[in-house]
Image (spheres, grey):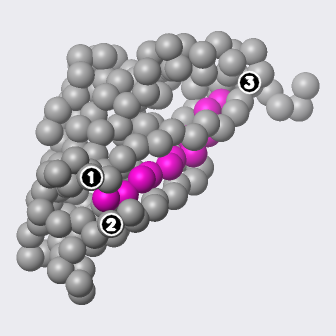
Amino acid sequence: MSSKKMQKLLRRVSWYPPYLGAGIKLKKYNKDFTCFEVELKMRWFNKNLFGTHFGGSLYAMSDPFFVFIVLNYLGQEYVIWDKSAKIIFMKPGKGIVKGVFKIKKSRLQEIKEEINIIGKNTYIFTGEIKNSANEIVAKVEKEIYIRKKDYNSFL
């Protein structure tokens, strides 16, 4: 994905209806799109029954970013999909929570080299959502399926 296309997509992220409705904001990202920081402020409309952050909003904070990172690095010659996800709630989320989702360039290069050899695979990436005291509120695991578009599994 070109840098301009990626920047345009990222400008729209905070206006994406599920993000807008939950109050999730993309706060910053680095210039090579390998690290994203997302924030969620506690509001009346994103609290659960217990007065803490709704778990679905905590998960939604992480949802697209690992795919964005891999897609931007590998480009349009690859099929990239979320395969599964898991969130582990560590403690109640209150106030402002932040998630940082990143993949090192060296890891992305390893993945690219492996996919170019074997054709397809799945990879698990992890991220954390923390409160303002830097305590972990939730851990997120995302399993991403990656396949070279020209890979023929029947050979």
| Residue 145 falls within the magenta-colored stretch | yes
Type of the residue with mark 2: Lys
- Mark 1 highlights which residue? 135
Q: Find the magenta span and give its range.
A: 137-147
Q: Nearer the viewer, residue 12 or 126?
A: 126
At 80% from the left edge and 27% from the top edge, which residue is drawn?
152
- Mark 3 highlights which residue? 119
Q: Earlier in the sequence, mark 3 or mark 2?
A: 2
Q: Earlier in the sequence, mark 1 or mark 2?
A: 2
At 47% from the left edge and 42% from the top edge, which residue is drawn?
126
Type of the residue with mark 3: Gly
The C terminus lies in which quarter of the figure? Answer: top right
At 14% from the left edge and 51% from the top edge, which residue is drawn?
132
The CA span between labels 1 and 2 is 9 Å
Judge whether 50 appears above or below 19 on screen. below
Q: Quadrant of residue 114?
A: top right
Dominant secondary structure, magenta: strand
Label of residue 91 in the image: 2
